[in-house]
Image: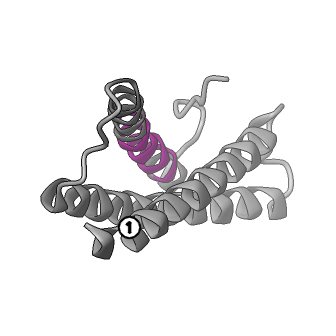
Amino acid sequence: MKVSCSVIIGANLSTCSFLVTIMGLVIPWSLTLAVVDVFSVFIRRPSRQRGVLSIVVLGDWVLSFLSLAASCSTASVSSLLLASEGFCIGKLCTRYQLSAAMAFLSWFLSLSSSLFNLWLLPSV
């Protein structure tokens, strides 16, 4: 599903752009970590380097909190749009609600990944 920021006016545009930008950072980060994990499983040698794991933990924490900020701002804009009468044209509000829900899900998964990596860090 495509999120269209061009329909939204004013401050709502910056909120939508913020969400799209953060998700544009989270998706490549997560895909890169998945490829590295699959590669280490295939060669049967997990990377247990403290520096690499520290960078992964730091990146997960930063992107997790940015994802939380983006999802909260999108959720607040969607609730503001629902409260104002006559502004929800077509499926605009449901798209906002869906994007906020998916951003919260992404934040939850990213936070669980960073907590798991933080738990692994002392064992290296």
The front one of 33 and 90 is 33
> What residue is rendered at 65% in x and 66% in y?
76
Q: Give the residue type at disc 1.
A: Leu
- The residue segment tinted magenta is 15-28
Using the rendered view, name the quadrant where residue 37 is placed: top left
Q: Which of 116 and 29 is in front in this view?
A: 116
Q: Residue at x 42, y 29 (%)?
A: 38
Q: Is residue 91 left or right of residue 72?
A: right
For image coordinates 59% across by 66% down, the residue present is: 72
Q: How is the image coloured?
A: one colour
Q: Using the image as rendered, state which of residue 43 and residue 71 is in the foreground.
A: 43
Describe residue 84's horizontal placement relative to residue 68 as left or right.
Answer: right
Quarter of the image for the N terminus: give it: top right
Q: Where is residue 107 in the image (x, y as percent from the top left)?
A: 55, 58
**Is disc 1 surrounded by few (<14), some (14 to 19) or many (20+) residues within 10 Å?**
some
Q: Which residue is drawn at 49% across and 50% down?
A: 10
**Which residue in the protein does label 1 denote?**
120
